[in-house]
Every structure is written in structure tokens, then in C-alpha cells.
Image (cartoon, rainbow, N blue to C red):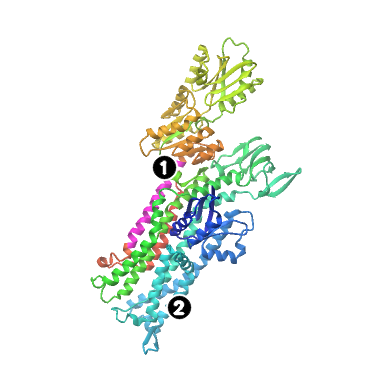
Amino acid sequence: MKKEIYPIIGMHCASCKALIEKMVKKLPGIHEVNVNFGTEKMTIEYDENKVNLNEIVRAVASAGTYQLITNSMSQTVLVSPGKVQEMQDNPEMEMSDHGGHHDHAAMLKAAEYKKLKNTVTWVGFGAVIFFVMMLWMILSQNLTILPMPKEIFGELILNTSRGEIISISFWFLIQFLLATPILFIGGKQIFLSAWQASKVRAANMDTLIAMGTFTAWGFSTVVTFYPQIFSSVTGEAEVFYEAAVFIIFFIILGRLLEAKAKGQANDAINKLLHLQVKEAIVIRNGEEIKLPIDQVVVGDILVVKPGQKIPVDGIITEGDSTLDESMVTGESLPVEKNPGDFVIGSTINKFGSIKFQAQKVGAETMLSQIIKMVEEAQGSQAPIQKLADKISGVFVPVVVTIAVFTFSFWIILGQSLGLIPTEVNNIQFSTFVATTVLIIACPCALGLATPTAVMVGTGRAALRGILIKNAESLEIAHKINTIVFDKTGTLTAGKPQVVDFITDKEIKDQKQILSLAVSLEAKSEHPLSEAIVVYGQTLEAQKKEVQKFKALEGKGVEGVIDHKKIYIGNTKLMEEQKITSNIALREKADELINSGSTVVYMAIDRKEIAIFSIADTIKEDAKKTIAVLHELGIQVVMLTGDHQKTAATIAKSLNIDHVIAEVLPTEKASQIKNLQTKLPKGSKIAMIGDGINDAPALAQADIGIAMGTGTDVAIESGDIVLVKGTLDKVIETIKLSKATMVIIKQNLIWAFAYNVLGIPLAAGLLYPLLNILLSPIIASVAMAFSSVSVVSNSLRLKKVKI
């Protein structure tokens, strides 16, 4: 299964999303496809054995509005029809550096924005001329001293071959000559998009605009050149070229503002991209040379001087320094780094000069992975968006139907029911109202409501060191009412230390026993084993050869040294192996457990002869985090393999609500599942962990939150990753989720209310009672700025306090 994300160039219609998805989903082997109108990207997951890129390209093309094309560097982007020719005609739009599709898409979008800005400028100039003409008309109707423009310009009288006399108003003719290029050149992309969609029997937002403006222009053109058609109709027919001009102007102005707002909404990705280093100083053949970043390979030794950025991820081999990691972790305090410490690419070396060995380069670096995660999250779909997408998918044909019904109603029944005054031209009135309906309807606000908020929310989270992998997790996070913490490495520092080593009083050589323990534990990778080994090394305990070593998951280890069978582990292991208990050691163990220590037992030839008291430091922010979670009404549970008494002591000190102790690693997921069945329906459980054995539990929970300081497996299993691994980020995640959902709901309410109220108003619902009739010009302003308002509201997330 292959997953790809393609940038979309020239997208401005929420209805196109459903159309492209529909055509691509028809292909065999397509697992999932999501076109995100807010981020302007298409995420697709497909089976390479059943479908290839060429087939996907054809499917997208069959949608009639956009095309997948590949540039000279084999980078694929999704492009609207008008942009395909531009890319072919302008080779400079191709990429010349190593920026990848981010830079390629950015260049294309910059070119598109510049062209749109130029179009808005000259169309705006034409709109100003029409505004002056409208002002003249209004003033001349109310001020007798100002002559009517129709009277000044007069008429052109023509005789037809049939002997008919046609009277063409020069005033109307001037408007026709001004409006026609504005409509068909300024609105070229709109008409092209509508035409492409119609060829595959589809409709999009541009279909409504094209129909509305063409209807206004077409009616006015008929009135201009064939006014005698309306001679049998009551009331003098007037033109409304200005409606077509102003509609086109406000639509493209709205798109310009929307494009700018979208750029601001997605600046988190841009900020992350700008962090990437372009060059690195590498030691090759004993000399320091400067190389492009894409020529650095794993194993290279790199030199970083004070003030420079770390080029790639690696391990320090020489030198000490302090690094500013805030751009990746969200933590403002600099971090001290010494030989053996891991450094993150794109972080800033503040003081010392260091050398380090490259461990991860290119797409494998942490920054590249963060960018990938953020992109995938922004390309995913939140459940709350599904209703809006369903409506957007059928929106255009429904609106066209309403417009046709509106026109038919007013032209057939308007005057017969006395709803339209007899002096009003009912054909003009009906056309005017139908045009307004077509123009005011806007699925774009619905299409933008959720993805723009998700884009800003996930982007801000990334800059704060919180990686949210998908929109669904961002939505669910605010509903969490129970959080389960794995103890070791999550609530505690994850670096346990031996604080006491007690042997049976009959043991004369304690160091000899410690040597046996260190030899056996050195074979294990468990944190408690590591603590015992480190303790033994500080006391210079000698290692011996171990035979028949065996790690017993969740219990301990066993092995043979000097023909002696040795067991080291918890009480479960001692009981399972029927080890003879040492009463004195057990009493001491109980005291240690009650004080919060973890006790590890050691037995030789089935007799307990020693215990290790091991303690793990509780994280500084643990208690404060749990207190804030309680304030938010969230229940806190601690899951641990520790003895019940040890776990209870730690839980009491942190004010944890519930403890599940003595849990084997393989049982963690089942414990989460058990909690899910016990809690009320609709409850949401989050699991926070950092180890390999936490991965199944992270996957089982409604939301898995992985500590970025943990294992790759845990991070892969988590829905949300806290890069720095600090617990205060859990609070930030929940608060950001709540803030994002508030914005999304506001956006959706506005988008639904706008269409629910706007369309009936445009259809003339209030005209019979209050004589209120919405102008197509006002409708175009409302439609254009409905999308801008949604994006602008989403941008407020940047400043929300979390």
C-alpha cells in the first residue's frame, strides 16, 4: 500500500473536492482518497499492484476540473486546467533547486497569486467605471438638473432586411463593450472551470457563477440589441451589465483575499520548511568542506560552530555546547549537550563548537518527519466535516434547481398573483432574482469551515512541540474524560536508580553477590536491569560469564553463573519458581514498598538472598499536570507493572484517582479495553506512554499520546506525539483541541446560516411583504466574503491562549 500527498494548484471550489474523490474512488485498489480544500492537497492511499499513477491521472482528468501533472524533476502536482498550459509555456515555473514539491507548489501558487492580483487590479478599474455610471444613473433619477445618460448618448436606429426598425441605446452599447471583456477575460478561469465540469456532466461552484453572470450579461445583451422582443411585455426592460461586472470583481477579489488568508493559515509548514539547513560543514579526507545538505550521508562527521544550525540529526562525538531546540520541541530553555548526546537537525548551536556523527539525513530527520506528520494531519478529514462534504457534493445541482424554480415561479405567477407590480418587467425581474440565487449560494464556506481550522490548529501544535497525526485525533482530544498514564518514563523520569542494596545477614561478601547480579542483569535491556548494572559499575563489581540466560517478560531474568541458578525479579517470579522467602528481607521490602520504592528480589538456588531498592524520580510537572486535568474534569488512571503498594504510594503523592498495578506488558491493551467497557457510553480514553510495550495500549485507546522521548514503536502507535515528552503538553493538546472545535462549530454555523438564510432572501421571499429584494451585486459581495470570513475566523486560533 502506497500513500502520497499531492499539492493542488488553482483550486477554488469546494464542490470539486467531491467530484475528484468520486472519480478516483472508482478505480480498483484505491484504499482512501481525500481532497482537502483548505490545505489544497490531495492525500491518496492505493495498492500499487492494482492501480498506477497514470490511471489516477486519467481519473482526475475525467473529473474535468483538475489534472495531475509531473514536472521535469518527476514531482507530481494536481493542477487546474488553466495552470497546465502555463506550466508548459513557462519553463521557469519548473523547479531548479532541491526543494522538492513544497517549493515547486509554492512557486506555482505564487505565480497564480500574482496573476490573480493583476486580474483583480484591471477588473477593479472596470468596476470603478461602472460604479461611476451607476452613480450617474441614480443621481439623474433623483436630481432634475442632471440629465439622464440615455438621453445624452441617444440611440442608434437600424433598419433590418425585414423592414423592422431596431433602436439600440448608445448608453447600453457602451456598457456592453465595457462589460464583455471584463466578464469573459477577467472571469476566464471561472468559465473554463464550469465548461470543463459540464463536459463530464458535473457541476461546481464556478458553474453557479458562470450561469449567474452569463444570464445577467445575456439578458442585458438581448435588451441592448433586440429590445423589440420585450415590446409585448409590461414595463421597460433595463440592462444590468454592472451586476455581471461587480459579481466577477467581488468573486475574484474574494479569492485573492482567501488565497492570502490560506497562506497565513498554513504558515506553520512554511516556518518548519524554512528551518531546514541548506549547507553543512563535513570532514572528508581529514579536511573541512562545505557541501549541500543533500550530499550529507549517514556516518559523516560534521562540524558546527557557535551560532550555526545543526544540519542533520546525529550524536555528538566531540565538544560541549548549549542548543536552542525551541523550534522543534516548543521548549524555550536551551539544552546542554555533551559527547554522546543526540542533536536534532535545524536546532541552533548557541555557544560551543562541536563535532557530531550524522545518524539520520534527508527525509529521515526529525524535522522532516515532523513536516510529514503535520502534512498528513492537515490532509486528513475530521468526522465533523463529513456532513458539510455531503452537502457540498449535492449543493450545486440543488441550487440550480432552486434558481430554475424561482425563475419559473416569478415569471408565471408573479404578476398574476399580484406579487410583482404591473409596471415592472416580469422577465427582467425573474431573471434578476434567479441570477441572485445562483450567485449568493456558496458551498465554499462549508468546504473551508473545518479544514482551515484543522490546518491552523495542527500547525500551531507543531510549533509548540505537539504532533497531531490526524484531524480526528484533534477533534476527539477535547472529549477526553479519562487519561491513563504509564508510570515509567511518563509520570517518572524513566531512569530508575538503585538507592539501596540489602543482603541476607549471613552473606559475608556483599560485593560477590552484587557481581552475580550485575553479570545477569547486563544481559537484559529492562530499565530496572540497567539501574542495577550502573549501580554495580559504580562499586566496581566484576562481571562473570552467564549461561542459559532467559528474560521472563514482566517478571525478571534467570541464568546460571558458576553452576548456580540465579533469579532476579519481582514477587511473581519468586512465587512462580517456588523460591524460599527470607522473612527479614520481606519485612524490609514491605517498608521500602510503602515508601514508594520498587523492590527487586534476588535468589540463588531457590533461596532469597538479597533485595534491591530502586526508585524513579517523579517528573517535576507531573503533579501540576494532574491537578489541571482534575480542574478540567478528567479522571486520571496510572497503569504500572509495579507492586500494588509501591504504585499506591506514588499515586497518593500525585493525587491520582485510580491505580492499576502489577500489570504485565502484554496485559496493558486489555486493561485499556476493560476500562472502555466499564466507563459510560461515549466516554473517551487517552493512553499516554513511551515504551515498546505501551504500543498496543496506545493503539487500543481512543487516543494514544506518545512521549517523543520514547521508542520509535510507541511514537508510531500514538495518534499524538509530544516531541519533548513534557506533561504540560498534554494540557495544551486538550485546550487546543477545545479551541479548534469552537472555531469549527462557529465556522459551520456561519456557513450553514449564510446559505439557509441567504438563498430564500435571494429568491425574493421578503419581496411581497416588505418589498425587499437582494441585488446580485450584494449577493456576490456576500458570497465572496463568506469564505474569507471563515478563513479569517480560523486564523484566530493563532492567538488563542492555551
Q: Is residue 478 above or below residue 100?
A: above
Query: What is the crowding at mark 2: few (fewer than 14 residues within 10 Å), some, or many (at least 20)?
Result: few
**Taking the image as drawn, is residue 801 in sight?**
no
Q: Residue furthest left?
A: 417
Q: Is residue 434 left or right of residue 49?
A: left
* Residue at position x 51%, y 22% in the image: 597
Judge by depth and name the residue closer to the eye, 289 or 161. 161
Residue bearing the label numbered 2: 177
Q: Secondary structure at mark 2?
A: helix
Q: Residue at x 41, y 30 (%)?
A: 657
Judging depth in this view, the residue of 31 and 585 nearest the camera is 31
Q: Is residue 91 left or right of residue 378?
A: right
Whole-percent x and y of residue 590? 48, 17
Per the image, the residue denoted by label 1 is 478
Q: Which residues are magenta?
A: 733-759
Residue 511 lies, in percent from the top left, at 63, 16
